[in-house]
Image (cartoon, helix red, strand yellow):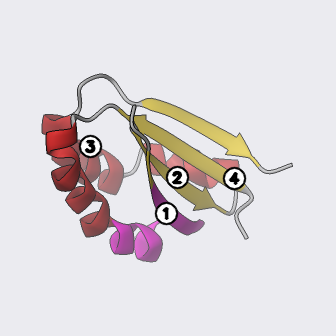
Amino acid sequence: MAKAYLEISLKINDADRANAGGVYAKYKTPFLETIKGATSKELLIRDEDVQVLHGFESVEDAKNYLSSELFNNDVVVALKPYLQDNPDVRIYSVA
């Protein structure tokens, strides 16, 4: 069970959501298999935005993911053409 969550909210036009979903699908398995402490990754869709909810064993693991090569060199680069604004990034600890 996750002890921390990383929530990234993305403003993406409706026309680009399928492509952004492809980025999520492409990197879900590498995230779960290679990132220390990763426990889950879910794509949440609302009319106003898309959120990716990542589960981790600790807040420290979530912070480390944000500075990882997978996140910065792969995920961010792949999503950049679809973003309408800077992502809203939040880390939560489970009480």
CB under 8 Å between discs 4 and 1: no
Mark 3 closeness class: few <14, some 14–19, many ≥20 residues within 10 Å: some
Residue 64 image position (x, y, % from top left): 52, 49
Q: Secondary structure at mark 4?
A: strand
**Please, what is the three-letter code of the amino acid marked with disc 4?**
Ala
CB under 8 Å between discs 1 and 2: yes
Reading the image, the residue beneath label 3 is 76
| CA distance separating discs 3 and 4 | 21 Å
Q: Is 31 on the left or on the right of 75, as rendered?
A: right
Residue 77 in view here: no
Residue drawn at x 68%, y 63% as measured from the top left: 57
Q: Dividing the picture into quarters, in which one does residue 7 lie?
A: top right
Q: Dividing the picture into quarters, in which one does residue 2 lie?
A: bottom right
**Please, what is the three-letter code of the amino acid marked with disc 3?**
Val
**Please, what is the three-letter code of the amino acid marked with disc 2?**
Leu
Q: Which residues are magenta?
A: 28-43
Q: Nearer the viewer, residue 18 or 8?
A: 18
CB under 8 Å between discs 3 and 2: no
The answer to whether residue 30 is magenta is yes
| CA distance separating discs 4 and 1 | 12 Å
Give the numbered dot on residue 53.
2
Q: Is residue 32 above or below residue 85?
A: below
Residue drawn at x 46%, y 40% as measured from the top left: 8
Reading the image, the residue beneath label 4 is 4
Reading the image, the residue beneath label 1 is 41
